[in-house]
Every structure is written in C-alpha cells, then in structure tokens.
Image (cartoon, coloured by chain):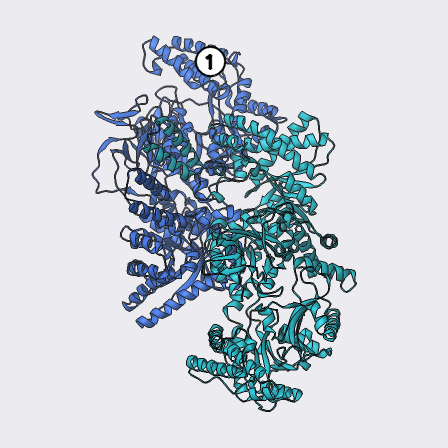
Chain colours: A blue, B cyan
Amino acid sequence: MTKKYVYSFNEGEKSMKSLLGGKGANLAEMTRIGLPVPPGITITTEACNAYFKNDGNFPENLEEQIQEKLSWLQEKTKKDFGSKENPLLVSVRSGAAISMPGMMDTILNLGLNDNTVEGLALNTNDRRFALDCYRRFIAMFSDVVLGIENARFERILEDIKEKNEIELDYQLTPDMLEKLIEEYKQLVKRETRKEFPQEPVEQLTMAVRAVFDSWNNQRARVYRRINKIPDDMGTAVNIQAMVFGNMGNDSGTGVAFTRNPSTGTRGVYGEYLINAQGEDVVAGIRTPQPIKKLADDMPKIYEQLNDICATLEAHYQDMQDIEFTIEREKLYLLQTRTGKRTAAAAIKIAVDMANEGIITQEEAILRIDPYSIDQLLHPMLDPDAELDVVAKGLPASPGAASGKVVFDPNEAERMADEGNKVILVRMETTPDDIHGIVASRGVLTSRGGMTSHAAVVARGMGKPCVSGCDQIKIDFSAQQFSVGETVVKKGDTITINGSTGDVILGEVPLIAPELSDEFKTLLSWADNFRPLGVRANADTPADAKKAREFGAKGIGLCRTEHMFMATDRLPIVQKMILSENEEERKQYLEKLLPMQQEDFYEILKVMEGYPVTIRLLDPPLHEFLPNVEELIIEITSMKYTGAPQEEIREKEKLLKQVKALSESNPMLGHRGCRLGITFPEIYAMQARAIFQAVSQLVQEGYKVRPEIEIPLVMHVKELAQLRELVIEIANEIKKETGTDFNYTIGTMIEVPRACATAGEIASEADFFSFGTNDLTQTTLGFSRDDAEGKFLQEYIDKQILNSNPFITLDRAGVGRLMEMAVAKGRSTREDLLVGICGEHGGDPDSIEFCHSIGLDFVSCSPYRVPIARLAAAQAALK
Amino acid sequence: MTKKYVYSFNEGEKSMKSLLGGKGANLAEMTRIGLPVPPGITITTEACNAYFKNDGNFPENLEEQIQEKLSWLQEKTKKDFGSKENPLLVSVRSGAAISMPGMMDTILNLGLNDNTVEGLALNTNDRRFALDCYRRFIAMFSDVVLGIENARFERILEDIKEKNEIELDYQLTPDMLEKLIEEYKQLVKRETRKEFPQEPVEQLTMAVRAVFDSWNNQRARVYRRINKIPDDMGTAVNIQAMVFGNMGNDSGTGVAFTRNPSTGTRGVYGEYLINAQGEDVVAGIRTPQPIKKLADDMPKIYEQLNDICATLEAHYQDMQDIEFTIEREKLYLLQTRTGKRTAAAAIKIAVDMANEGIITQEEAILRIDPYSIDQLLHPMLDPDAELDVVAKGLPASPGAASGKVVFDPNEAERMADEGNKVILVRMETTPDDIHGIVASRGVLTSRGGMTSHAAVVARGMGKPCVSGCDQIKIDFSAQQFSVGETVVKKGDTITINGSTGDVILGEVPLIAPELSDEFKTLLSWADNFRPLGVRANADTPADAKKAREFGAKGIGLCRTEHMFMATDRLPIVQKMILSENEEERKQYLEKLLPMQQEDFYEILKVMEGYPVTIRLLDPPLHEFLPNVEELIIEITSMKYTGAPQEEIREKEKLLKQVKALSESNPMLGHRGCRLGITFPEIYAMQARAIFQAVSQLVQEGYKVRPEIEIPLVMHVKELAQLRELVIEIANEIKKETGTDFNYTIGTMIEVPRACATAGEIASEADFFSFGTNDLTQTTLGFSRDDAEGKFLQEYIDKQILNSNPFITLDRAGVGRLMEMAVAKGRSTREDLLVGICGEHGGDPDSIEFCHSIGLDFVSCSPYRVPIARLAAAQAALK
C-alpha cells in the first residue's frame, strides 16, 4: 500500500498539524468551516522526511500523487497548468507543524512562462500586471530555487528604472517590463547555463524540492536550535491557487490579528497595503495602512473581515493571526494561525478570555509562556528622567533598552561579546540578521511596520523594538544615522522605548516595572494551583522588599559575602583575612559583627512572618584581596623607580600572602563550609550576628524565621560540626539576652557527593537547598566562567548540549543526582524541607522539573518571582 | 545481674581478645596451655568503656570485683598486698584488643611503700635491690599517674650521683637510695600537695584509672587515627604478680621472635639484657645482647626458651613476639603476640609456613598486608654507586632513603611540608616523635636496638631505619652530628640503608628492587585466586617493560600529554597551540605526527599480546605554554630597561595569547575531550599516529590490541562524535596501508555526569575506565592541589574524613557513583569492559572496593602492580 503523501484542502483539518504543517492544517480547517480560501493541496511532512531519508530524492509515488491532486485543483479552479488561455498559477509555501516565521521560502505566481503570461494578461485584461507578475516570479524563483541572489535582479531593475528615468515600480511600462524579463532570463541563463524553466510542472517539482531543502538551510537550523524544535519534524508544502492583491486599487493584501497583539485589547487589529502582494507587507518594504482604514476604503470587506475574525477566534478559542488578500473586491484568507503576541497581550487576552468564559482559569494559566513574561519584569524608563527624544517610530516590541549603536549584525555580536550593551540599527532586518538581534538589547529599524520581521522577532525574544522610524536616515558607509541636524555614530549610546516608539539620545535610567491588574489576577489564580513554594534570592533589604511585592513567600538565599564587599567593610575584611593568628582575626571579626547584625536585622524585619535562609560565608577568601597581577606589576615598577626598600618589602609581603591564598581551582578550593571548619571563628561571628539580630527583633515583637544555611557540604560530619557550633552560639545568645527564638539549620546541596550521601546528611539537616550553579559545575566538570567564554557555545552549536546547562537544568545529569538526593534525604527525614536556590530556580523548564521531583520551594531573583509563580502552577497543571 | 569486669588469667583464652585485650587474652592462653606465666588478673575493656561512659568513674561493682580477684592472686602467690613480711608486688599494664606498642603506659613494682620495701629487702635478701625498686616505682608511678615528668626525677638522681661522685646507677648504695627516695617523695609532695600514696590498694586504683585515661591521651589518639582503630574499643588492664629481671646476674629480661622479623628466616631471634627490668630493653636505653649469647650465659634457659617458642608458633600458627623475664634462673613469659615483621619477612614466613603445611596458600595470601609490601617495591641503593659510608648502625628497617638531616620532629614535619625529603636523626625516639617519623623518608638513631621504638615504628611504616648507631655523636644545640672528624649539619643530605645499617654522606642513586623468589611465589598463588585483572599506567616503553616484569597484563592508561612535554617537541606544541587558524595548526600537528607514531609503536610493541589503553590529549592547552607571571615581570622590566618597542609588543602579544588560554578553574575548563570537540584536528592527528603505528606493527607480524580512550566525557554525544572521528581515521589508514587491525574505543568516567548517564554513554563505548582522581575532585568539589596543601589535613585531624580521598577511594561518595555507573553501563551493554586507572588502582582498600563492584581490571603505576595483584586476590578471598 502506498502512503498518502498529498492532501487537498478539503481532506484535512486542524488536528492534522504534524502531518500537514500548521499552515496546511489551518487552510484545510478554514476550508472545512466554509471560509473563503483559494483551493489548494498540501504535501505532507512525511514526504519531506522521506525525501531526506531518500538522499534528496522524491519518495516513490510522490510525483504521481502530486499530479493527481493537481488535476483535482485544475478542475476545481477551472484553470489549467500551462494553459495559454486560462492558466493556473499557484503559490508554493512551506509550512512546518510549528510556525517558523520568515524561516522558510515562498514562491508566488508559479506556473507563469512566456506562454501563460499572455493568458494571464488576457484573462485579467491587464498586460502590465501580468508582465509584472512574471518578472517577480522569475526573480523569486531564481533566488529561492536556483540560488541566484535577489539583489542581482534588483540591480537590473534599478538600471532600467534609471535608464528610463522613472522612480517607482508601478511606473514601469509593459515594454520596459518585457525588456526586464528578457534581461532576467539572460541572467538566469548566464548563471545556470540553462534556460529559465518554462514547463510549469518542472517549475513545481523544483519548487517543492527547494521548499524541502529549505528545511535544512542555515537560518532554519539556527531558528530550530534557538527554539528547541527537533530537526526531524520536516515541513509540509502548500500549493495554492493564486489570488492577486496587486490587481489594482480594488485589490490589496494584509495581515490582521483578532485582538491587539501588543496590548491584548479586543478588536481586529492589523495592517494592509492596497495593490500589493502578500510578501510586501511582511517584508516591511512599504509602510502599510492600519486595518481601520479599510472601513473607509472597502467597508463591505471590512465588515466581512470582522465577522471572519470573530468566527475564527470562537472556533480556535484563541487570538488568531490571519493573512488575507483582496482580489478585485473579493476577500480570500490565505492563512490563520494562533497569533504571536507580547507577553502583556498574552496575559490580558488569557485573563479576558477566562473572564469571558471562552477558556478556563487553568487554560489561561497554561496559555502564558513563562519565559515570555520576563520582558514585563524588565526595567522600564524612569518616568522622571528627562528624555532627549530625537525620533519616533512604531512601538513594535515593548520594553526599553539603552546601548551603543551598531549597524551590522556581525559587529553587534562582536561588541556584545566584548561586554557592550548594543542597539542594532537597520533599515530593515531579515532572517540573516538573527544573530545580531540575539546579541542586541534592542532593535531600531527605519522601515517596516508592526508586523515586519524586526518587530516579530524582537517580540518573540522579549526585546524592545522600534520599527518603521523613517525619520532617521541611515548612512551605512559612514556608520552613522542622522535625524535632521543630529548625527548618531556607531558606538554612541541611545535608548529606545519599544512601548512608545521613542528614540532617545544617551542612556536613560531604568526603573522596575509595575505588574498590570491582569497579571496580578493571573498570578493569584496561579497561586491556587501550585504546591511548589516560591521564594526569592535577596541580599539586601531593598531586594527583599521587591521580592515581597512580587509575591515571594520568603528568602531562599541570602548571601552574606556581598555584605563583606561594601567599601567601608572591605579593608576590615582584608585585615581579618590576613591576620596571622586566630586572636588577631577575632579582633577584626568583632568589628564586622555589628555591621552584619544590622544587615540581618533589616532583612529579617522586611521578611517578617516568612522564612529567611541565610547562607554563611561561601567564596574563597582571596576573592576579597587585591589582584595578584596588579601587585606584580606594581612591585616590578617600584624596583625600577627606586621606591624605598621597605615599601617594596611591604608589598612583597602582601603579594606573598595573597599568593599563599590564591588557588589553582578556586571553585573547588578553600571555600564554603571549609572556611567554617578551618576558621570556625568566622562562622561563629556570623551566627552571633544573626542571632543577636533575631533576639533584638523578637524583643521588638517581630515574628522572624531564620534558617541558617551551611554551604558546600560534602560530608555529613562537616554539617554536624558546624551545626553544633551554631547551636552553641544560639544558646549563648538566648542566655545572654534572655529571649527565646526558633531557627533551623540546613545545608546547600551543591556537590555530587552531597547528593550521593544525602541520606546521611539529612540526619543533621532541617532543610536542603540545591545550589544548582555549583552542582552543575561539579557534575559536568564544567567551570562556568571558562565554559561560557570558550567552548560552551560550540557544544550547543554541535548539538552536544541542547541548551546552556547553567540556565536550564540538565535533567539527565544534574537532575538525576537531585532526584537521588531528594529520595535519600526524605528517606532519612520524612519532613525534610527541600528547595533550590541556584539560578535555575527562576527558569520555567527547571521549575517544572523541580515540581516533578517534589521540591518544596524554588528561590530566584526577585524579578523572576512572578515567572516562578506561573511556571510552578503550570508544572502542577501539566 | 552484675557484669563480670575482672578475670583471672585462668579464666580466659586467646579468643577473648576484644574483652581482655590482646595481652590479657594471650597471657590467659599461655597460662591455659601450661607455660610459665606469673599469675595475674585482667580488667576488661568493657570496664574501660563503662568508665568513660560514667564520666571517668569506676562502674558499679568494679572495685569489689578487683578486690575479690586480688584476694585470689594473694592466695595464688602466697603473698599479701601491703604485707611487710611477704608483700605482693604487681605490674599494671594496659592491653587493647589491637596491639598499640608504646602507646599506653605501664607501671612496675606497684605495692611498694615505706613498709613493704623492707619486706622485699628481707625476702630477696637484697636491700639495695629493694630500695632501687622502690625509687623506680615512685618515679614511674609519679610520671604515669601523677603527671610529674620523669626528667625531674632523673635530675635528682643525677645530682646525687654527682654529689657522691659515682657514674652508674648500680653504684648507688642503700644509703644513697634512701636519700634519693626521700627526695623523690618530697618532690611528689611539693607537686601534688599530698604524700606519695602509701596504701597499695589506693596505688592500684589510681594506676587502673591512669591506664584507662591513657586510652585517650594524645599519642594513643594519634596512633589510632593513623591506624584507623575505632576510639570505642577501650583498653583492658593487666595486673600481674611481679617477677624481677634485675635481681642480679642470674636474672635478666628480653624479647624474642620465633623467626627473624627482618628477613623471615627460621629460628629464635631476639635480644636480652642481664640484670634489667623489661622496660629497659624496649626503651633502647642500654644496647642489649643477641639472644644467641643466652646459650652461653644460661644454656638451660636458652633451651627452654627455644622449646617454648616452638610450642607457641605451633599453637598460634604464626610467628610470635614474646617478652620474658628470668628471675634467679627461672624463666617467666610476660607476653606473647603475633610478631610484627618487615614485609619481606612477612612474605617469606607466609610462603614458608604454607610450604611447611602450617597454613594454606589462601591463608598465606591473606596474611600479607598489601600496604606493607610497598616498601619492597621502593627503590634500593644502586650497587654500582660509590658510597661514602661514615658510620654503621643496626639494620633496623630495610630499604634506603636519602634526605636532609633534621634533628627535631616538628622541624621534620615543617621541612617535609615545604617539599623537602628529610631523614630524622635522634638519640632515640619516643611515641611523641611519631609525626616526625611520618614526615621523614627514614630514621637514624644513635641508641636502641632492633626492637627499639624507632625500629618498630619505622618497620610498621615501611620506612628505612638505622638504629643504635653509637658512632654518631649528636649535638642537638648545634643542630649537627659528628662521626670522628666528619660533621653533618642540619640540612646536609645523607643516605641511610636500613638493610645494612650503613649511614652514607650525600645522595646515592636508587635502583628498582628485585622481587624475591618467595614474593614471586606468593604473587603467582595470588593470580590464581583473583578475577580482577591488573594492568599498569605507563607512558613510556621503559615503564611498559617494567610493568610487564611486575606482572601487569596490559596498560590501562597511556597518557599522551607527557609525550608533548619532551624538550624537542614542546616548541612545536606551543606553536601548534598558538596557531591562529586550523590550517596553521594542522601544519604543526603534521610535524608531531611521526613523533607520536614512534611513541605508540614502541609501547604497543613492548605490550604485544596485551591491551594498551591510549588516552587522547587531556590537559588544558595552557599547561604547555609559558607562565603568565613570569611574562608579566619580563614585560614590565623591559619597559623600564628601554627594550625596543617591537620586542615589547611581541611579548605582549604572547602574553595576551597565553592569558586568553588561561582559565579560572583549569581543572574544569577547556580540556579532555572538549579539546577533541573544539580542535578535532588534534585528536585526528593522535588517532592517525596510533593507527599508523598499529598498521606498521601488524605488517611486522606483531599482535597488538590498542584501545582508544576519550577522556573527560560527560555526555554521550561527545563520545559519539569523537568515536566517529576515530573510526573514520582508522578506516582511512586501513585503506591507505592495506592492513586490517582491531581496536576498541571507550571512555574515561571521571565526572559525576558520566556516572549518572552511564547507561547512555555505554551505547557508544566498548569500555569504561574510571579516572578516580578527577572523579574524586568533582564529586567532592575538592581541587586536589588546593585541598592537599591547605585544608585536607585539617579535615583528617578533625575526623571529618578518615583518610585522604585521593589515596583511598571514598566509598560512600565516589564509590556510590561508580557503582551506579557500572550498573547502568552494563545494563546497556552486558559485555562492557570496566576498569579503573586513577591512583586508587594501586591502593589495596580501593582495589577491594573495585572487586566488590565487579570491575574487570585495575591499573596502577608499574611499581604498585605486585600490590594490586595481591590485594585483588585478597579481595576475592575475603
């Protein structure tokens, strides 16, 4: 039995996405529910996969099946492929199961040749139009199928326009177009040593093959990698009868959203161009009209479009993004899909739809990509800042960013690698620019609308974008842009506000965003569905306050070393470290004690009622000391400049001390609880500072819940000895102050040995908290500092790793060890509290895993708390 | 019912060691089989533990039980405690279940007081003897029980001898002794504000308490830590009727071994002193006579001793170490125990006894401590070297060592910590010197015999020792020793030969030892009992040859980086690393190719017939480059000395390159297979070199078994990609050379992720080899370089770790991950070959673990191969 590789639109429906691709399945669905869709057929993704398995040859029977369906299409349209009288023209479009905008290639007007162009001219009674279609087809086909760059055809076009002293395309006369076509064909012949293919079936076969091949072009592969789409899904090919939006002023083409994709506001939203083909809108070459204007231009069509949008939204139960073409006052739908939207819009749409009864609260929660809401939690422009606004474009992707101007995507990548914040400024962007957008803080384009490539991609990445800002004139060769008198050069800093479209000179202070009412509503729904607690990592009272505002129910990690770094403390800390004996060290520790006590007092107070996990000193001591290299340069210089011997000796002594403390692998060195074991007086001081603060607060009537955390434990005895030390000090302070207070003592789990011996460790621990940054480093044997700068990207490029394991938890490796630790720990102590406080605690994919292995809480930076609340609820609902 | 805390010697037997201690159980056993043992009683180890549990108070009923048994003892000896007429005198000795020589305190002549001393004088008809006993008792009791240093009594003795112008102790007259006793008692009164206890029962109670307390003195705790003896075993106390070796020239005391403890030769071996008490021999204050001389002095006693030795050896089925006393021509046994012996003697005795039919081959194998045979595998003095022998002492512990002379044990430790080899030189050693002996390569003493403290301890540790070398005069204050004209100062280098007793000036070249016939026999027996294979780690043909000689059946780890370090190659390697592109790099790699090929050719040839695991390049590349610090000093200097700008720029460029390659945690950085992934051309060159060598050897008729090993794999895809690369090259070379050959491809398992995902990794691996050095570092989060220099010792001192995890495998942590990896790996691939090639592969305890989790082989340095063969057999037999 032969596999069915080709379906007509009448044969499919929306559930068949993985076979027909998203576009094909939705075209079939719209056909099925009676919407005006030009007839067409879809070649399945299975055919694509079979093609690759078959070393780039069509699988058996595919050609025949295409022929058969083509016959059906000819009957349906009453047109014939290759007919001079009534030629069938088709578009050929790719369509994978998962939408990959701009990634795959499209060919329009296929079927045109020297013969059929005359038929089209005859039928449309517009020879100029037919010739224009033909020359577009040749250029597009040659670019996509034959690999001849479009720019070369553009150059020929520009030459002809110049020779004939005309400026705009539509001013081309039929004669000029004929000339143009001739020259296009000659170019093709020069390049391919063959005539431009005249036979429509041959054109079609070549086009299908090109669509298949485009599944593996570099842009597509990069997109799949970024979006974690498997390589073996394949793409379908949609072959659809052409309708023409470029048949004059009663024609047009556009895109529409059933709700506003930026804000989520109800009502059809979109753009259109009169007398244009579809690609013109998306490519952003001409700046289109807002859809409301269609009400004036073609009120009937506008009404019909509104009805269709309502139908589609009800049918799909989600906001739709549609493409339409008007051919001589008749509306056709060419695509519908679930519309991409900003995170803000996504939240508003989901909450509105749940309130409207279209979807449930659970569905509303599951609709929001927790990764996307990060952009809502990014800092915004300080409203009190004075803004030097030089230009205004379209508010294409919300949020604000400052950075150095750069005009080239490669340059953007380079500068970002060197640690610069950059803003990519382009006339318009194409899929080839993606790496530059990835590297930039934001994008500014001088052309293109809200649905231009730059806008769509930036929104997807949660980066601000201002598009269509035609006030700015870009001079690529001079590496600058100008707005009137103002000139902005490469490297100058600008700020863009993607929520307003403002382009501002210089850097603008950013402030924390406010959560919208819908966002708060959604999060409160989410809280009802999640068993996983959400805490924040916070080292300062300000962070702790922000965390509470964002809904954190406690602090999961309060690092104490940042407190040591404050400028007024560092000199004391350094003296403490360089002390030659315990007595001297204790003297400096005593000076630090009241400072630390004050820190803890404030943080515990802000978090009243909630637990606060305070981690005792963790980093290697030499992190607090001067840099070895600088000291060496200084000493060598002193020797040549005749500095006093005494001073040199002093410096040399310091150097010796610093070097004695420096380590070959500091990450695995004398740090964490190893400091507590070898210098118990340091941990004793910290414990004293904590408990004195606690006792003070208790006396003032606050209810505080300190959790003392011992870092980097690898053996139960480390914890046992330090636990004893902490308990002893707590008892001392209870006695000294006459107050009573509760506290718990637990440990970070951040080396594999702690996971392997979690059963033993749990016997001394009230809680575990996974320090997955270090645990990832030790489990993989990857130093983050060294890996991220050097080989990690190559590991992702070569598909050894799917993602950066320091961002998304490595479930197969680190995850297994965590699972083991939870099981062993709870088998010793059933009520063991287990959380995570590594960066992964704010990563949705990692949160899902944490939920699945039964953690009690995740802890992340305050700004990621809302993400964690949402992701935790989704994990529970999934 | 009350617990029985006190046993008479008639009530016990040798199997009751844990209750009665080793000494007590054996005294009971000897009593039981009718040997002449002075009667006595034993207080159990349970009493000791109860004492500690009871906060240092005697447990209920203990006092009464002692009294009861004392009555029995009085009846048995027909003497009375405290009787002026016929006083009972006893020795009080500790005795734990495991022998702890010199660690616990002993008291002789207990029961003497102002009254009973007269009875002793009367009974022995020797007032001088009685008074001498009394003054010794006061000093000993005061030192051990009352904590008054023995030196203070010595000083009084010296004063009196000076005043009376006599030199030797035995010249003291009764009057002088009476004066001495008076002054001793006054010293005690001054120090304790109490009279010296006169009541024998009080003396006994105090002594028992002191023995108990000595279980927890520092020396004992250190000994237990070093020897891994649990702290809660407790010690028994033996109270035995005194016999006197110091009753004149028809009395004496000595120690004897049933075979020679240095060589294993059959026949009684030992030393004795005429007219002396037991402690005099062991303490090494007087140099004793060899036991053979007893045949002349007291032929009957000599014969009786020989008979008893034969009886004991047959009874215990092992070589015995006995203590005896002759009181007026009557022989008494005071102790027997299994004798400590050198590793060479242990092997000879075991093999001899197995051949004599006394024990089985299995028992012979199990008798040898595999840790101890390390000393036989240590290099010996080169017989061709010219030796500047300055003195000769006793060959107290075999082997040879060179090092800097040091006179103080603390200094020895300090100097060793700074990386020096040291030889500890002392008049005699005491248990307080142990840390100094641990730190030294060997020990030289000017006093003491073959059974002196220094000799026993050094033999136990497998270090060479020359004792009783009275030719050397030590001047501690000048920190030097002299032999005639020759003066050797602290820090000068000497060599000692513990097998001959030679003391040699300067450093002497050492050579590899030969295995004795008995050793070879034992190892051949061992090979029959072990399923675990033994391979060697060898990077050079010479090492490979040595490994084969020692019985290695293949190479488990051939590192390729050492080959890169050779002086003629390093410049090429550096250029290769600093190449700016792949093409340039390939050019230098091509130069390295023939060199590597030659290396592999030789090693594979030497190991013909056996597998050779060749690990591809592992260390971070910057290890091959110049030192950053030196470069900085050089550049800064150049700037001040006006070096040409161009040269400075050149150096600065180099510095920049080196810094770009330097890493914050190189152990977790860009190394191992990460190099292979990012610079496939390096691994490709190595694979080519290996297979070209293989093909050459195959053509020459050799049978070679290369195993290509990919290091530091953490993800199956790393292995998959590099496996593909290696296979491709193998196929190329098969084609190029027209030869066929077999090879396998596997991986090191050295990061926890590899253990956690071993099931996946096994799908691409023919073998696993645990790199437990790195695996320990990553599992514990311990950088070996940083830990060993800094906090590791403190971790052991504070009993967090029992031993250095880089020497003995951490079973609870690293071991669990290994077990997981073996199980997962074999579940994917049943025939997966699994070995270990970390340093642990030569550690007996770790080998036992490797056997228990079912590894196929261990691989260790060539010199440890015999240890591994033995340990592997023991693991199987246990």
Question: Of residues B726 and A266, which is closer to you in this image?
Answer: B726
Write the residue at 34% across / 39% down. A636
Write the residue at 29% across / 65% down. A697
Q: Position of residue A512 (x, y in %)?
A: 29, 46
Indicate the quadrant containing the N terminus of chain B: top left, top right, bottom left or bottom right: bottom right
Q: Quadrant of residue A306?
A: top left
**Can see residue A209?**
yes
**In the rendered view, would you say B480 is above or below A732?**
above
Q: Chain of mark 1?
A: A
Question: Of residues B670 and A653, which is closer to you in this image?
Answer: A653
Q: Position of residue B436 (x, y in %)?
A: 51, 60
Tally of marks: 1
Q: Position of residue A18 (x, y in %)?
A: 53, 36
Question: Of residues B652 and B318, which is closer to you in this image?
Answer: B318
Q: Which residue is mark 1?
A: A117
**In the rendered view, would you say B248 is above or below B767?**
below
